[in-house]
């Protein structure tokens, strides 16, 4: 705990608490009558002995200072009371059976219930004043509120038959026409207990009427879900389990199915308080953040028994996410709200409203080119969509990955709704879907275009799965796709096949690209600080132009040995991996592992154990990739080049051959399957001006680096990358060089003859060299200068 002195009061207090707790629950008494007994057990035995011998008396006090509402300090009053013996071992074991069958939604909730069962003993169940039910066997006392009403849900199943709908105090009889005085113990026993027979000798209620009540109870009971606060776990909710076990010990079908306990609600990580001003009413919050913004933020605030935290900054961020999503949908579908507004609408009467709505719907249909058929082959698209999106139905790698991620999001979101885990709903059904869309957009940003069919599918799925939380915004978006239809009638989307291998490969690609960016940042830092080989502090940092990615085909021999040993230990240890301390001893001084690898041994073991814990299959420690990582990197070579802003990327696959390691720029021992390594380097280049000489053209002049061995095709691709949106479009670019660059670059171009003095490159495979001393290009034996001309068609 890093305690330095007696002045570290907070740390000392924490240490004291930990020691006391550990000694109480784990300590063993070493002297006296109860030696070799756990402290937690011996405490009560010693207490009983002291009281029995007259050396002590029972004394009660609150756990902490308790103040009444009249601002008086409270003390414990020892009075005659009735207690329920929740410490009865047989009763406690039956209650544990009830608990084990229940869905508590969070392991923390179950842990708390189990903790309460371990310490709960006698509890005072009566009091002498206030409101409540009289204790049946001693009517001078009332049942205290936490012990009362633990199975009141059973009454709800028949309340509609006993009380009139508008009679909340029970004065008016319900459809069963039964008086309160007729509801004897025998009657309730017949309703609630399946083994009881009709009490013909003690009631005048018709058997058919009681059978009706009995059937209602059997239909509606048990409790499917009870939602409550975490502060009731140590008392009321636990008592409910005890009482269900006591009343229906042989009828588990009537035990509660699930309890959902939640924490308290914090505002900006602090308790809400009017006195401090940290307070926000629902009306104020809706006015400030809208209904959907509130619902989204509350759903994301927390589901478990930990206190949920409503952050106002987060609410603003959530609103921005929703707004950004809506605006993106409008951009994709070409929705312009201004076009829907009639400038003369103020003068229109309400009678014209139906005409306005129908006109708006017609406009949207016309804009979206919606077809009632699901056959995409006949669907029409606007010129904007044809220019910016693919309209074919032949999905490529990026399309199939995005499609699988949409399908997976549908499945996981539905499961989260079923479990009422709303934070997970947003994790999979909003944040995860938005990230999948962003990745798809990034991967398709240059070499490929997004598929409009898939984009529309994404928009519809996103609107439907988020609708239970943000109904107003989702209905608004849904009607962009389906005018005049409400999302309230939409069916839950059907999830197609999820290709886990594809999804895993894309996750690997994005993770690898992120890791490479960090290495690129480290490379730039080394360059600027002069720590790289041959660099001096006076030199400006050189941006890398090329990169080589090294991919491991297999593990090195010492790592293969470790993997095989772990498998053997797993099977010989009852299908459980030993802990790290045992593994460290096992691998110590093994001849199969060279001493130079000992520092890397335990980190590698930890890595393998994490792979096993993730999959649950011991085979995964050497076959954890469901795809060919070399092939994934090769297919996405262009994306990686764009992401790292380099001119060329080479991918090399290695197998640990000693010859490969000689003069290698990286340490091959650091390369593992699933963890490739990248090496950056800078190659010499010259800056060349690319000038557009087309009359009345909006294209600009660009300065672009050219390196030895570049082809005309590479120059064209580089111009497209560094140019504006006009150059990135699917247009033909023609490249020219000057016949006599020293002459023509000093003359004013003739607008009527823009091609005068220019020679077009004969083919795109022509190789260009550079003259770094003069900063010019060389084509064969001809120096073609430091300027090229491009035309766009």
Image (cartoon, helix red, strand yellow):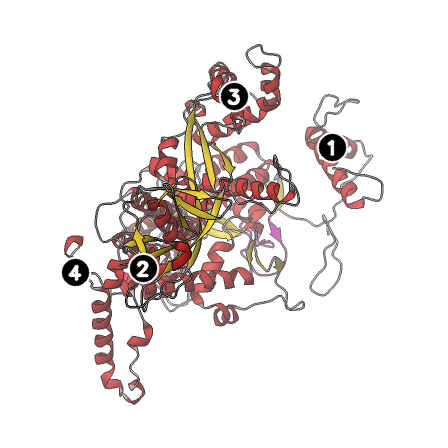
Q: Identify the secondary structure beneath mark 4.
A: loop
Q: Which residue is mark 2?
A: 176
Image position of 683 with respect to 723: above or below? above
Q: Give SS at disc 1.
A: helix
Q: Earlier in the sequence, mark 2 or mark 3?
A: 2
Would residue 380 appear left or right of 461 to someone viewing this image?
left
Q: CA distance from mark 1 to mark 4?
A: 82 Å
Q: Mark 4 to mark 2: distance in Å?
A: 53 Å
Q: Chief secondary structure of the magenta span? A: loop
Q: CA distance from mark 4 to mark 3?
A: 65 Å
In space, the residues marked 1 and 2 are separated at their CA atoms by: 55 Å
Dots 1 and 2: beta carbons under 8 Å? no
Which of pointers 4 and 2 lies earlier in the amino acid sequence?
2
What residue sits right under mark 1 in the picture?
Answer: 48
Identify which residue, 19 or 698, lies in the foreground: 698
Which disc, if any, is residue 662? 3
Magenta segment, which residues?
Answer: 125-145
Is residue 137 magenta-colored?
A: yes
Q: Which residue is mark 4?
A: 372
Q: Are marks 3 and 1 in contact (CB under 8 Å)?
A: no
Secondary structure of residue under mark 3: loop
In terms of depth relative to the viewer, which is nearer, 213 or 120? 120
Q: Quadrant of residue 277?
A: bottom right
């Amino acid at each position: 705990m890093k305690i330095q002195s007696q002045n570290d009061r907070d740390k000392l207090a924490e240490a004291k608490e930990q020691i006391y707790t550990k000694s109480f629950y784990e300590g063993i008494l070493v002297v006296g009558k109860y030696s070799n007994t756990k402290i937690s057990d011996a405490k009560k035995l010693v207490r009983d002995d002291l009281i029995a011998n007259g050396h002590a008396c029972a004394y009660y006090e609150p756990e902490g200072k308790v103040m009444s509402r009249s601002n008086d300090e409270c003390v414990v009053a020892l009075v005659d009371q009735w207690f329920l013996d929740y410490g009865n071992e047989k009763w406690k074991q039956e209650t544990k059976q009830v608990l084990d069958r229940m869905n508590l939604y969070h392991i923390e909730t179950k842990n708390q219930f189990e903790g309460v069962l371990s310490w709960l003993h006698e509890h005072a169940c009566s009091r002498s004043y206030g409101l409540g039910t009289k204790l049946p066997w001693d009517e001078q006392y009332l049942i205290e509120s936490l012990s009362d009403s633990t199975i009141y849900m059973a009454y709800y199943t028949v309340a509609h038959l006993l009380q009139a709908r508008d009679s909340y105090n029970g004065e008016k009889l319900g459809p069963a026409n039964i008086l309160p005085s007729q509801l004897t113990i025998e009657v309730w026993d017949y309703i609630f207990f399946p083994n009881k027979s009709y009490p013909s000798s003690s009631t005048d209620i018709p058997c058919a009427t009681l059978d009706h009540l009995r059937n209602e109870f059997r239909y509606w009971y048990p409790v499917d879900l009870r939602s409550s606060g975490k502060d009731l776990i140590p008392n009321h909710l636990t008592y409910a389990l005890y009482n269900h076990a006591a009343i229906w010990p042989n009828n588990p079908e009537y035990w509660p199915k699930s309890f959902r306990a939640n924490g308290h609600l914090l505002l900006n990580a602090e308790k809400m308080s009017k006195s401090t001003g940290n307070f926000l009413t629902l009306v104020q919050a809706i006015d400030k953040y809208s209904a959907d913004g509130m619902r989204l933020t509350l759903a994301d605030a927390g589901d478990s028994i930990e206190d949920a935290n409503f952050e106002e900054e987060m609410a603003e961020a959530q609103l921005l996410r929703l707004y950004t999503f809506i605006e993106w949908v409008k951009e994709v579908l070409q929705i312009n709200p201004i076009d829907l507004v009639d400038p003369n609408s103020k003068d229109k009467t309400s009678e014209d409203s139906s005409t306005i709505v129908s006109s708006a719907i017609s406009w949207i249909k016309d804009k979206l080119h919606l077809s009632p058929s699901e056959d995409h082959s006949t669907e029409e698209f606007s010129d904007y969509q044809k220019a910016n999106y693919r309209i074919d139905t032949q999905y490529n790698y990026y399309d199939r990955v995005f499609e699988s991620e949409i399908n997976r999001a549908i499945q996981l979101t539905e499961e989260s709704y079923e479990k009422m885990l709303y934070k997970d709903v947003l994790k999979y059904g909003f944040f995860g879907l938005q990230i999948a869309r962003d990745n798809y957009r990034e991967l398709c940003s240059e070499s490929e275009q997004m598929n409009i069919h898939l984009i529309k599918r994404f928009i519809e799925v996103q609107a439907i799965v988020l609708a239970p939380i943000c109904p107003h915004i989702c209905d608004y978006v849904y009607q962009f796709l389906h005018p005049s239809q409400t999302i309230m009638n939409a069916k839950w989307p059907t999830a197609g096949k999820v290709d886990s291998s594809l999804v895993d490969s894309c996750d690997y690609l994005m993770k690898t690209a992120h890791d490479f960016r960090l290495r690129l940042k480290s490379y730039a830092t080394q360059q600027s600080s002069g720590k790289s080989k041959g660099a001096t502090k006076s030199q400006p940092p050189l941006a890398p132009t090329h990169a080589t990615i090294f991919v491991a085909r297999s593990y090195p021999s010492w790592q293969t040995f470790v993997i095989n040993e772990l498998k053997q230990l797993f099977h010989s240890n009852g299908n459980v991996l030993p802990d790290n301390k045992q593994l460290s001893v096992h691998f110590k001084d093994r001849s199969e592992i060279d001493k130079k690898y000992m520092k890397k041994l335990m980190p590698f073991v930890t890595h393998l154990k994490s792979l096993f814990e993730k999959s649950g299959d011991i085979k995964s420690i050497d076959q954890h990739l469901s795809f060919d990582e070399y092939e994934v990197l090769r297919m996405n070579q262009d994306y990686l080049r764009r992401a790292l802003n380099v001119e060329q990327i080479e991918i090399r696959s290695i197998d640990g051959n000693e010859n490969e390691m000689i003069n290698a720029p990286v340490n091959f021992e650091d390369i593992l399957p699933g963890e490739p390594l990248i090496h950056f380097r800078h190659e010499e280049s010259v800056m060349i001006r690319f000038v557009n000489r087309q009359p009345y053209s909006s294209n600009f002049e660009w300065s672009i680096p050219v390196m030895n061995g570049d082809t005309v095709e590479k120059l064209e691709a580089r111009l497209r990358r560094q140019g504006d949106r006009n150059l990135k479009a699917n247009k033909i670019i023609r490249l020219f060089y000057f016949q006599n660059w020293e002459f023509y670059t000093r003359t004013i171009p003739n607008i009527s003859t823009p091609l005068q003095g220019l020679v077009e490159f004969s083919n795109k495979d022509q190789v260009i060299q550079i003259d770094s001393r003069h900063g010019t290009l060389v084509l064969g034996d001809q120096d073609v200068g430091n300027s090229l001309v491009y035309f766009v068609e």
